[in-house]
Amino acid sequence: MKNKIIVTGGCGYIGSHTVIELLENNYDVVILDDLSNSTEDTLDRILKITGTKPTFVNVDLKDETATKAIFQKHKDAKAVINFAAHKAVGESVKEPLMYYRNNLYSLINVLSSQIENNIEGFIFSSSATVYGTPETLPITEKDETQRPFSPYGNTKKIAEEIIDDVIKSNSNLQSISLRYFNPIGAHESGLIGELPSGIPNNLMPYITQTAAGIREKLMVYGNDYPTKDGTPIRDYIHVVDLAKAHVLAVERILKKEQDEAFEVFNLGTGNGFSVLDVINSFEKVTNSKLNYEIVERRPGDVPKLYAATNLAKEKLGWSADKSLDEMIKSSWDWEQKFRKQNTN
Ligand code: WQD
């Protein structure tokens, strides 16, 4: 019997890559997704890559009755991986209630439905944004969290606090929160990758769309930060490396290897790269020049953020091994293949 895992948001960017890793590691997958920022043809792409089409339910997880009914139907599941959430930082500043309602109602409905059905494992898709502006680097999981700049980021911090409280009240729930640094890249098949709707907020898709001629020019938000070249430093991590960590987190819970009922791990490479490093690597890998301009700082950006990675290595047996050049090449391959698929 295969172990069944419920994946909310499984048609999205990180969710779909994780579904592939789960299927390739012999799990049964049920995807719950409202397709608000993804499309159903992801399922066919997953089928092409893995030979399996996961079970799919189109559901709005803000709907408590509908969520409970689905969990009742899949109560033989062993764990839930919760990716479903809105994630655009700028939009969350303009529409905070939409973000709190979507990201937190869905979390509450999922947690209560799984507790009702005795599904013990819960893996949460968190973010390095919960560290706010850190005082020391690299950031360890023991460092204090701070109120993030954006409502989006705050939903991640509040969600971790909710999980912590629920765990303390319910001895059966076992949870791992994975704090992602900056996920980039795409599956090597070129069949799935990041598909931001509208103008991208994040650096990597903005670069690839600029190089593909969809955007005129990349705006580099400030070069007067206290870093080696003045542009902010981030810890970019390949999405497939990230996806693999979720499988290891599921295993850790199912094998009852946790030290505590609620654990938190950073998922990054531990290497910091500046915006100009990323641009230089992109130009080298693609042998082309990128059109960009240095402009004012973007509000809320922290100067430097990179992970301490030893805890994930020690406890999950996980580390990221893709280089910046490999990550960037894979983002660019996806951009090109995706545009080709969609102009044919
Ligand atoms: C990286 C660097 C920008 C765009 C955000 C969220 C985080 C997580 C990932 C996701 C910064 C610079 C960017 C551009 C630029 N959430 N930049 N021009 O801000 O580290 O993290 O995304 O769901 O919670 O906060 O990532 O890719 O937006 O920016 O110069 O057009 O690139 O200033 O220094 P960030 P990013």
Image (tube, rainbow, N blue to C red):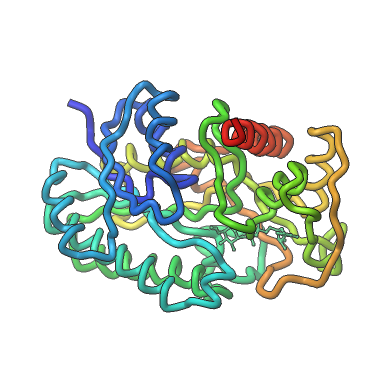
Q: Residue at x 58, y 75 (%)?
A: 149
Q: In the displayed structure, would residue 114 be above or below residue 147?
A: above
Image spot of residue 209 (x, y percent): 70, 47
Q: In terms of depth relative to the viewer, which is nearer, 177 or 296? A: 296
Name of the residue lying farthest toward the front: 344
Query: Which residue is at the far top?
Result: 51
* Residue 323 in sight in this render: no
Quarter of the picture containing the C terminus is: top right
> Does residue 327 appear to the left or right of 163 in the view shown?
right
Ligand 1: quadrant of the figure: bottom right
Quadrant hosting residue 31: top left
Q: Residue at x 36, y 73 (%)?
A: 101
Q: Residue 76, percent across and down?
A: 14, 41
**Left or right, 322 with reference to 104:** right
Taking depth in this image into account, of 108 and 337 the one nearest to the observer is 337
The quarter in which the N terminus is drawn is top left
Q: Identify the residue at image location x=70%, y=33%.
A: 329
Residue at 59%, 40% (x, y): give it. 238
Q: Is residue 207 above or below residue 199?
A: above
In the rendered image, is residue 314 in sight? yes
Residue 109 falls in which quadrant of the image? bottom left
